[in-house]
Image: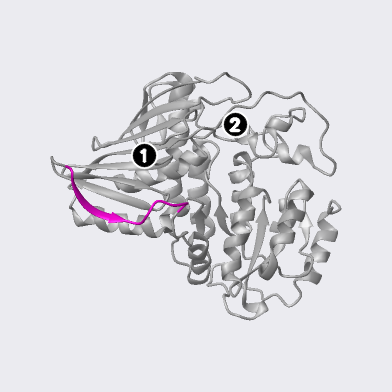
């Protein structure tokens, strides 16, 4: 297991590991050639299960990128990722650190992938942008609503490439669905629906216990309130607690919400939000409901609907995660499992179809490749900061409507809830010192 790293010896080791790395101007196109010195220098922050998936996708682009740094407050997770780097490892032993600032201080790092728990996304993402790094940020980009606006402002200020981890934006099935929608065969899309329907099960609460050896638990908590260590509030199941995550609504549901926004074709936030949810299963360590129904009404009267049911072994229309795009002439049943079907007119006659049911994207999207291409070209990626905010904002507004039991009236221009001061206050949160947002934010 790795020894905790100080900033000084980390930078020393990084210099040795990356000797000969090419310095570049941050506002200019970045390298992407075949030699070691021409490759994009990438740091990985948050080395849990999501990052393991990123490493597999990076391996397809070993001719363009090398991983030069690993960061996680649990060195065991960094060790696991290190063992899987293979052709994208910059050295035999890629430097590891518990503190992301060590990585950001190294000016040779071109870009970072951030796959931490949600509460760390923006507190790391903002200083990464300020340090001149291009950023791939896992979904949801923001833990609370206000963070999304801060990201938009920071990307603009520092002129960085930003990609949100909603990989369906790069999927073949999504691209084909867009062609069908744009053809007009379904008429005007007036309502879209997203669903996340699966059996998440139930786990018993466990007592507090000792912090695992080597883990910097205070840093893992970061901007979240101080808590005794509890295994249910740590790896994997942290997402069921508001201090760190956004429940299924903001986790798996983030992909389906994003596709509902895509199908509806909106480029703004809604003005009215209603929500209902409850816990039908026996309550336990889950702080979020196990079923939700949320509706978002936009200024042009179009509507987006979200539903989840986390206690059923069956899906809707045959899919655990999916969307319905309802037009004036027909509708589409779409799923990120890699297929869509359309039905036209009063008799629901079969229309254009694509793909067969399978796992995500079938074939998998190359969202990572799109990010790497944009680092080199300085073009906008498919899921930029504005796209991220218009989708992630729905998570936060829906959660606030559910928690306050209020029909929210929202001003999309001012980005304020206008009919409830207490609900409006929930657009942001308190951050524990010395962690949290950088002073300039």
Q: Nearer the viewer's eye, disc 2 or disc 1? A: 2
State the residue at coordinates (75%, 46%): 73
State the residue at coordinates (60%, 45%): 121
Image quadrant in which the C terminus is located: top right
State the residue at coordinates (64%, 48%): 49
Q: Which residues fall within the magenta stretch? A: 348-360
Q: Residue furthest left?
A: 346
Query: Is 85 located above or below residue 256 in the figure?
Result: below
Q: Nearer the viewer, residue 3 or 339?
A: 339
What's the mark number on residue 83? none
How far from the left and from the top, in percent, is residue 350? 20, 49
Query: Is 167 located above or below residue 221 in the figure?
Result: below
Q: Nearer the viewer, residue 121 or 430?
A: 121
How far from the left and from the top, in percent, is residue 94? 76, 64
According to the picture, the residue beneath numbered tag 2 turns out to be 240
117 in the magenta segment: no
Query: Is 285 located above or below residue 438 in the figure?
Result: above
Q: What is the crowding at mark 1: few (fewer than 14 residues within 10 Å), some, or many (at least 20)?
A: many
How far from the left and from the top, in percent, is residue 410? 37, 30
Q: Is residue 388 visible?
A: yes
What's the mark number on residue 269? 1
Label 2 and label 1: CA atoms lie apart by 26 Å
When asked about the image quadrant of residue 408, the answer is top left
């Amino acid at each position: 297991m790795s020894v905790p790293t100080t900033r000084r010896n980390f930078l020393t080791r990084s210099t040795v590991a990356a000797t000969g790395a090419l310095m570049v101007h941050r506002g200019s196109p970045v390298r992407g050639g075949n030699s070691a010195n021409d490759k994009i220098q990438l740091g990985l922050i948050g080395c849990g299960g999501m990052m393991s998936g990123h490493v597999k996708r990076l391996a397809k682009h070993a001719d363009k990128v090398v991983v030069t740094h690993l960061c996680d407050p649990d060195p065991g997770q960094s060790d696991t990722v290190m063992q899987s780097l293979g052709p994208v490892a910059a050295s035999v032993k890629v430097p590891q650190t518990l503190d992301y600032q060590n990585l950001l201080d190294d000016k040779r790092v071109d870009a970072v992938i951030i796959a931490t728990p949600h509460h760390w996304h923006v507190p790391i993402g903002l200083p990464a942008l300020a340090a001149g790094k291009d950023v791939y940020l896992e979904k949801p980009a923001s833990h609370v609503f206000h963070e999304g606006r801060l990201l938009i402002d920071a990307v603009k200020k520092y002129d960085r490439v930003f990609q949100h981890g909603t990989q369906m934006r790069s999927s073949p099935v999504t691209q084909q669905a867009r062609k069908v929608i744009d053809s007009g065969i379904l008429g005007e899309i007036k309502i879209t629906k997203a669903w996340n329907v699966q059996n998440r099960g139930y786990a018993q609460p466990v007592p507090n216990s000792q912090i695992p050896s080597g883990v910097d638990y205070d840093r893992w908590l970061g901007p979240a309130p101080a808590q005794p260590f509890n295994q249910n509030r740590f790896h994997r199941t942290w997402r069921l607690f508001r201090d760190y995550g956004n429940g299924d609504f903001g986790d798996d549901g983030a992909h389906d919400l994003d596709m509902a926004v895509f199908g509806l074709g909106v480029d703004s936030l809604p003005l009215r939000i209603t929500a209902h949810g409850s816990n039908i299963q026996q309550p336990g360590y889950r702080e979020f409901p196990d079923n939700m129904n949320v509706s978002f009404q936009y200024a042009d009267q179009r509507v987006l609907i979200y539903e989840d049911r986390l206690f059923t072994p069956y899906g809707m229309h045959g899919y655990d995660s999916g969307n319905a795009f309802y037009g004036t002439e027909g509708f589409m049943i779409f799923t990120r499992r890699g297929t869509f079907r359309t039905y036209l007119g009063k008799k629901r006659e079969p229309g254009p179809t694509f793909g067969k049911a399978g796992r995500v994207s079938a074939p998998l999207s190359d969202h990572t490749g799109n990010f790497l291409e944009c680092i080199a070209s300085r073009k906008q990626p498919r899921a930029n900061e504005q796209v991220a905010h218009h989708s992630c904002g729905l998570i936060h507004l829906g959660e606030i409507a559910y928690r306050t039991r209020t029909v929210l009236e929202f001003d999309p221009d001012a980005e304020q809830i206008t009919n409830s001061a207490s609900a409006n206050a929930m657009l942001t949160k308190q951050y524990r010192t010395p962690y949290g947002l950088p002073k300039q934010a």
